[in-house]
Image (tube, rainbow, N blue to C red):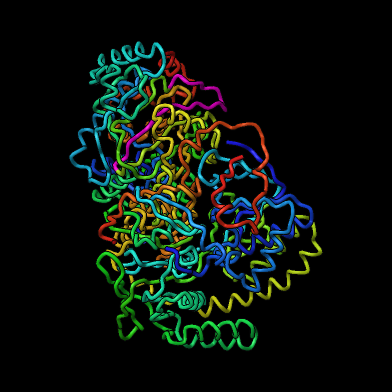
């Protein structure tokens, strides 16, 4: 995900960080919000609801918890409120990545 | 408009008031249930929903054993929403010499016919692997129950309705008059007898009752894969200080059907405010982390407080509180209101019908606090 | 737990919080600004300091960067009040709770979007309007995706224009308010707020290839595992629009939760404030959207009033009151124009999920008599978001208002609650300011 995007400083475009998504190494532009990075990777759903429905981010601003994931071992983190940093590890327990690919 | 007359007006639709209303209506009494807010919105909602046998005193042991039995008999009738589960209680031996306490507790319970088993370290570990490894063992009481109190209270309200009880919600009882009571909207309800089952609120109408609030905090986690299977309580839970203003904290954790863990418990004597006290929360969290070390990362999503109501002698206050036998109270359960709801209902209805109470009526009689000699003697233990 | 002390604590680093912090700091007050978001700017200025900031944002961001004596605590989650003069907060990355003691507090907690339950709204690919914009600003490219923007309010057009500029294919903007009201509002803008009118026209021109339909609203969202189409109604006829993503919001809701925990009075869903932006609780101010939705200009003015007043500069605060009152009046027009229509109440069916956290349906909730009963008997609003999404929806649907707020404001790990209080310390030194680079501020751990 290196194409130019609005909202990111062009001068920083070359700077990337490495994050780990379910054990897979991914490079993302520095400053990318984690939820946005996951969406960009095609992961549209991050959680499964109480009754088993697939859910993805809704509010984008830290309110709804639908974008929750385990980040650096801490469960139920709101990925929309986190910025990717070097070495960040995110586990998306419920998302079936094959289905989303 | 014709004035409706009732045999019994019940103030408070918590689990105790609702159970009393249901049983009285079932017994053929004309009942009205009066509640200022929602069903189970007071101490019933704030509590844990643990039905257990307590052995603090011989009276309490007999009482809670009797009460639990009524719940066990009701199990098949309860809707799934009540989340009735015989999880059992495990009393944990946490400190040196605690296994001795386990043994003496087991002896006491067995003497009263309460089924229980002493677990050593290995058995405990197998049953509850999430607990810290160095515990010496515990006492397993298999027939203790975990349930969801607000749903149980609603079940009793519906049952009362089924037996033609009337509901006056949005109203509280403001004044007791002869043969009737006044509600907060100014209206009166004609009722031969009145049962005050509104917890700490009883004090407003019967100010001479020596009721004391004991504030408690509870924490609840988010949903997770269930890893705790029984209600877990640190032994010596009731040994803690009881000075006014002091507080005590003990490990007490309950697995909910949702996969959430309800974490207790604290006891602050004489504190009636409902604010969250973070130093108490901190101690509760520390205790929980000590016993369940792998839970440190588990998010707590909600913290709340509730008021237990207690009498000085640690026994409930159930019975008539006036010479004319018009007004009854049912309060002072001190954190055992869920356990005692059905037993209290039985007790109250027997009093109303003039039948013998399941346990000696003097034990719990409110008039024991009026200073009369006969009551003093009963309570010299 | 550690303890830190500031003279003025500002919660929320959006326009109101920035304005309050700057004015107070420039008067010599020692200020800390705490915000759950990874960066300053709030929702409206999200990402602006990295791209070219708007003409409104630029001077404030610059002023914030220059002001000395402000500590920017971004990525810090407020946990709850600890007495009247302290707030517990969780620094980014977890760790120990910090008890931030303050003499005065400004609540600039902003607003969130109003979501109304629509059959199918839980499908992945359904976002808030501002929500989708935030995620795109965060780095998600939606280029060439077909997007429907629906709901209500001026935000819809702004979001549509933004998405279009990023290369998205915005296929429809659907506003529930009727033409009569929207046009009256446009006329009002033309006559009284020409700059805003021009801004609206510019936005409309940006998405000129996209139909802007008024008087229609989503009644069903279709899709198997993610959104595929939306069915709209205009009250008479229904029509279907295919899309890859739906951005849907019905206006904004003030974030009053912290104020409520502090005991501040609420009125009509917002925090009640006096002429000086003071709440009903002494030493607590509120500014911006948390006092009622009125837009960024009003937030800036209110933030300044609060900041000036909190630092004892009553003259400066007083000079801004008339401007604030005018902007508030203007906001009243907006609320009338975009008032939600009654038909929206009959959009969800009994099977529609209302509480997304606990999967409680409208049918289950409707049996209950109150919020409290719905909470106790159906677990509605008892999940992770603590009723922040379903609460305002139920207030709209049933008029239920008595949503009780419990700490923590956001989930806190058990271990963080358990940590021992260590001796008093300073807040992390303010290396970080709005001018610092984005990646630096969000990755740095700010534990003292």
Q: Which residues are magenta?
A: B238-257
Q: Is residue C244 above or below residue C208?
A: above
Q: Residue at x 37, y 40 (%)?
A: B193
Q: Is residue C223 visible?
A: yes
Q: Residue at x 24, y 50 (%)?
A: B162
Q: Give coordinates of residue B186: x percent, y percent.
A: 49, 54
Q: Is residue C325 left or right of residue B205?
A: right
Does the magenta-highlighted stretch encompass residue B49?
A: no
Q: Is residue B21 visible?
A: no
Does the magenta-highlighted stretch encompass residue B246?
A: yes
Q: Residue at x 55, y 83 (%)?
A: C200
Image quadrant for the N terminus of chain B?
bottom left
Q: Quadrant of residue B128?
A: top left
Q: How many marks?
A: 0
Question: Could you say which is closer to the camera, residue C82 or residue C78?
Answer: C78
Q: Quadrant of residue B246?
A: top right
Q: Is residue B152 above or below residue C74?
A: above
Q: Is residue C218 left or right of residue C12?
A: left
Q: Give coordinates of residue C353: x percent, y percent.
A: 32, 61
Question: Could you say which is closer to the camera, residue B166 or residue C48?
Answer: C48
Q: Is residue B210 left or right of residue B83?
A: right
Image quadrant for the C terminus of chain B?
top left
Q: Is residue B169 left or right of residue C281?
A: left
Q: Give coordinates of residue C230: x percent, y percent.
A: 32, 75
- Which residue ends up furthest to the left in the rendered image? B76
Q: Give coordinates of residue C238: x percent, y percent.
A: 30, 83
């Amino acid at each position: 995900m290196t194409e130019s995007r609005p909202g990111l400083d062009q001068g920083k475009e070359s700077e990337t960080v490495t994050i780990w998504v379910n054990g897979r190494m991914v490079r993302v532009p520095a400053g990318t919000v984690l939820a946005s990075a996951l969406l960009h990777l095609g992961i549209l759903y991050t959680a499964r609801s109480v009754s088993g429905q697939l859910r993805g981010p809704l509010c984008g601003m830290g309110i709804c918890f639908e974008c929750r994931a385990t980040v650096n071992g801490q469960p139920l983190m709101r990925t929309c409120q986190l910025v990717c940093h070097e070495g960040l590890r995110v586990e998306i327990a419920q998302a079936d990545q094959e289905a989303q690919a | 408009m014709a004035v409706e007359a009732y045999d019994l007006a019940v103030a408070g639709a918590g689990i105790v008031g609702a159970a009393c209303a249901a049983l009285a209506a079932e017994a053929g009494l004309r009942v009205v249930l009066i509640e200022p807010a929602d069903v189970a919105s007071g101490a019933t909602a704030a509590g844990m929903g643990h039905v257990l046998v307590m052995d603090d005193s011989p009276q309490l042991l007999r009482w809670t054993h009797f009460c639990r039995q009524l719940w066990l008999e009701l199990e098949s009738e309860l809707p799934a929403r009540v989340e009735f589960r015989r999880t059992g209680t495990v009393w944990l031996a946490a400190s040196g010499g605690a296994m001795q306490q386990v043994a003496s507790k087991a002896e006491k319970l067995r003497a009263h016919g309460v089924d229980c088993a002493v677990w050593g370290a290995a058995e405990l570990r197998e049953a509850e692997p999430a607990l810290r490894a160095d515990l010496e063992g515990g006492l397993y009481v298999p027939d203790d129950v975990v349930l969801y109190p607000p749903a149980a209270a609603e079940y009793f309200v519906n049952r009362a309705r089924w037996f033609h009880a009337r509901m006056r919600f949005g109203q509280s009882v403001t004044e007791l008059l002869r043969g009737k009571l006044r509600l907060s909207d100014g209206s009166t309800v004609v009722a031969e007898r009145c049962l005050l089952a509104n917890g700490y609120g009883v004090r407003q109408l019967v100010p001479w009752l020596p009721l004391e609030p004991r504030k408690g905090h509870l924490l609840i986690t988010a949903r997770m894969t269930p890893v705790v299977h029984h209600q877990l309580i640190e032994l010596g839970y009731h040994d803690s200080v009881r000075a006014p203003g002091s507080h005590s904290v003990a490990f007490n954790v309950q697995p909910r059907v949702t996969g959430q863990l309800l974490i207790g418990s604290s006891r602050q004597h004489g504190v009636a405010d409902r604010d969250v006290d973070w130093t108490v929360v901190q101690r509760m969290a520390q205790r929980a982390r000590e016993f369940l070390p792998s839970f440190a990362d588990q998010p707590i999503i909600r913290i709340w407080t509730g008021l237990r109501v207690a009498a000085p002698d640690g026994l409930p206050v159930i019975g008539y509180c006036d010479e004319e036998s018009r007004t009854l109270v049912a309060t002072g359960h001190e954190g055992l209101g869920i356990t005692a709801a059905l037993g209290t209902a039985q007790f109250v209805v027997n009093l109303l019908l003039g039948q013998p109470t399941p346990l000696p009526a003097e034990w719990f009689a409110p008039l024991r606090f009026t200073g009369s000699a006969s009551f003093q003697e009963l309570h010299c233990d | 737990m550690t303890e830190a002390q500031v003279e003025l604590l500002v919660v929320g680093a959006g326009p109101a919080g920035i304005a309050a912090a700057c004015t107070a700091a420039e008067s010599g007050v020692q200020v800390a600004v705490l915000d759950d978001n990874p960066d300053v700017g709030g929702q409206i200025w999200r990402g602006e300091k990295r791209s070219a900031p708007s003409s409104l944002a630029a001077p404030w961001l610059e002023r914030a960067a220059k002001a000395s004596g402000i500590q920017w605590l971004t990525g810090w989650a407020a946990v709850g009040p600890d007495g009247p003069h302290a707030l517990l907060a969780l620094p980014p990355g977890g760790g120990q709770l910090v008890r931030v003691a303050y003499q005065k507090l400004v609540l600039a907690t902003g607003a969130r979007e109003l979501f109304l339950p629509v059959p199918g709204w839980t499908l992945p690919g359904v976002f808030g309007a501002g929500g989708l914009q935030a995620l795109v600003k965060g780095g998600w490219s939606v280029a060439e995706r077909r997007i429907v923007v629906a709901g209500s309010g001026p935000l819809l057009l702004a979001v549509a224009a933004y998405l279009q500029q990023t290369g998205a294919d915005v296929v429809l903007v659907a506003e529930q308010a009727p033409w009569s009201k929207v046009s009256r509002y446009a006329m009002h803008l033309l006559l009284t707020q020409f700059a805003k009118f021009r801004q609206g026209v510019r936005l409309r021109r940006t998405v000129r290839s996209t139909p802007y339909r008024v008087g229609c609203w989503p009644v069903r969202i279709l899709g198997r595992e993610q959104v595929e189409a939306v069915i709209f109604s205009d009250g008479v006829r229904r029509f279907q629009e295919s899309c890859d993503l739906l951005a849907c919001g019905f206006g904004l809701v003030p974030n009053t939760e912290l104020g409520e925990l502090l005991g501040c009075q609420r009125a009509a869903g917002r925090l009640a404030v006096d002429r000086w932006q003071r709440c009903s609780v002494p030493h607590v101010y509120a500014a911006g959207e948390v006092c009622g939705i009125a837009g960024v200009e009003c937030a800036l003015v209110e933030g300044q009033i609060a900041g000036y007043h909190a630092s004892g500069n009553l003259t400066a605060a007083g000079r801004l009151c008339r401007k604030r009152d005018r902007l508030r009046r203007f906001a009243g027009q907006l609320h009338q124009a975009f008032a939600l229509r009654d038909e929206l109440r009959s959009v969800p069916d009994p099977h529609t999920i209302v509480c997304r956290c606990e999967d409680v349906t409208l049918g289950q909730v409707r049996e209950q008599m109150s919020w409290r009963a719905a909470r106790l008997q159906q677990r509605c609003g008892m999940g992770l978001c603590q009723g922040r999404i379903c609460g305002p929806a139920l207030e709209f649907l049933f008029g239920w208002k008595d949503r009780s707020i419990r700490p923590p404001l956001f989930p806190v790990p058990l271990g963080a609650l358990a940590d021992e209080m260590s001796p008093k310390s300073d807040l992390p030194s303010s290396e970080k300011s709005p001018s610092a680079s984005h990646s630096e501020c969000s990755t740095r751990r700010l534990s003292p």
